[in-house]
Image: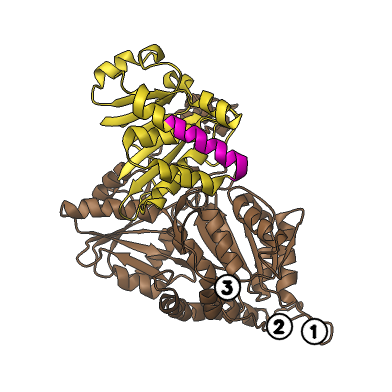
Amino acid sequence: MLKQIEGSRAVAEAVALCRPEVICAYPISPQTHIVEALGEMVKSKRLSPCEYINVESEFAAMSVSIGASAAGARAYTATASQGLLFMTEAVYNASGLGLPIVMTVANRAIGAPINIWNDHSDSLSQRDSGWMQLFAENNQEAVDLHIQAFRLAEELSMPIMVCMDGYILTHAFERVDIPAQEQVDAYLPLFEPRQVLDPSEPISIGAMVGPEAFMEVKYLAHAKQMQAIERIPQLAAEFRNTFGRDSGGLIRTYCTEDAETMIIAMGSVLGTIKDTVDEMRNEGHRIGVLSIISYRPFPLEQVKSALLHCKRFLVLEKSLAVGMGGIVATDVRMAVTGAGLKGYTAVAGLGGRPIFKSQLHQLFRQAERDELPPVTFLDLDWEAVNKQLAREKQTRRSGPVAENILHDKGIVSAKFG
Amino acid sequence: MFQIRVHGRGGQGVVTAAEMLSIAAFEEGSHAQAFPSFGSERTGAPVVAFCRISDREIRSREPIVEADAVIIQDPTLLHQVAVFAGLKPEGYVLVNSQHGIENLGLGEFATEHRAVRFCSLPATELGIRHIGRPIPNVPLLAGFAALSGIIKLESVVKAINARFRGQVAEGNIAAATEAYHLVKEVACSSR
């Protein structure tokens, strides 16, 4: 049913349609509206049978999710930013134990400096945690990816993060088709656990594994994600058959036919990128877009074949590997090793810095003319940066960086309006 | 694509206004997208929310730079925030005030931007009278419907019913209806 609905509420509706049996989450912006809505649904028994467990922290939220999943329950949680970092040890345990938990990450920057706004630093920091990570381009896809995520997670018995841009998607009202319960039931079978803690048939889960078997267990986690490379497109195709629309998959391409320049990105910025590319195409630019939906597993082959025909690519990412450059760009470069393509990285939108079409027009044209350095920082205020660098050179007691930059920019405190 | 910015202060229902506007547009079969400038609000701080309306899917997520309309929920923002930034030459401006454009200190701006369609509406007073609270957002939405013709009053009423129940919904509908007729019949005839 078509609804004009907030992204968070749409995702809560989708999760409820997947019939989770245990939801355990600790509220953190910008994830809060999702778990609030689910809490209401459990309390009113609209979502039943389901237990919503209140806990004191994200660490507990993931730990309870692990316990619930190990006991054979379909388990769901959601978090963001510092919350994801706080649960990190348990995040690795969930995947190490092979428990198919689905978690929404309402992508948000990581402090310090404290910042509640969107970028991809949080889930990308868990790149190697063994969780799969799927990125939604809009709220319809966020809804659809959750339904696909439960199916994939449970088939492989591995956990998945469904990543949606905090505020930009979680707090956006837009048109979303919320599926019918029968459709979701037809697509998503009952959870049949591979392992279950059952008092009548006692087993243990979580053995200590020494050097003689640790590599094999870890390799099997990798093998699961390689299986996911096969299954994700199949599940997206099946989704299309059941629900009648394209959603999910490993990658998606746009205007690639004769593209000499390819723009690569993840998440909601793809909408702004596609509008920019449409305008540039109208002016005769040969430019196209590659959306990465599945960040983990990373579809090396698919990315390679999507790029082979182009001359150059630009990865626009909302993340920064400090001391190195791009995070997503590193994987993309790996995919096209030896192909002789020029590759550029643009770090953009950190901490919620808005990304404007006008900036993208300029950036993409610079890429076309091969005028970009290997790593660019979109909209970086060089004056403020250089002033601080000069200050540090001049005086030993240069003081806290964040406060200095705010002062130089004439900002009393973080802007809310 | 029609792009609207709503300027106001935390606590005035700025974000709710943009959301309800998107619901009203959706009710008319349009695509609509509403989002806040930032997710966190403090009471009294300047807040801006955005709404796009289109007959096609809306993909862009950039904050609204070129506005077809601005709704200003607190006139004290007129001289504090660049509320008219990027306003199109023939755009719409609706200000929550009992005063006309001249008395708001906008005479010069209005002279320089002759094609801009200005209107003021005592929305806070309408809120107090009909809802019992000084919340101007819903009367302003109805006023915007009257000023621009982009959405219908019935759609605003549908958005109210989607958001509120019982007496609050009734009060908001009464406020919206009066605001709509005020803008249609009185407030804009002076210009």
Residue A233 on the magenta span: no
Q: Secondary structure at mark 1?
A: loop
Letter of the chain that mark 2 sits on in the rendering: A
Badge 2 crowding class, 10 Å Cα cut-off, few under 14, some 14 to 19, many 20 or more, is: some
Q: Are marks 3 and 1 on the same chain?
A: yes
What is the chain letter for disc 1?
A
Tell me: A288 left or right of A403.
left
Q: How many marks?
A: 3
Rendered location of residue A324, percent (x, y): 46, 53
Residue that carries the numbered disc 2 in the rendered image? A195
For chain B, the rendered hue is yellow
Q: For the residues marked 1 and 2, what is the alpha-carbon distance in whole angstroms?
A: 9 Å
In the figure, the shade used to draw chain A is brown
Asked whether disc 1 touches disc 2, contact meaning CB atoms under 8 Å apart, the reply is yes
Residue at the image point whose x is 53% and y is 80% from the top: A186
Looking at this view, name the residue that lies furthest to the bottom: A201
Q: Amino acid at mark 3?
A: Phe
Q: Which residues are magenta?
A: B165-179
Does the segment drawn in magenta span residue B168? yes
> What's under tag 2, amino acid-wise?
Gln
Please identify the dominant SS of the magenta region: helix
Same subunit, labels 2 and 3: the answer reads yes
> Residue under mark 3: which chain is it in?
A
Nearest to the eye among marks 2 and 3: give it. Answer: 3
Front residue of this view, candidates A156 and A398:
A156
Q: Which residue is tagged 1?
A: A203
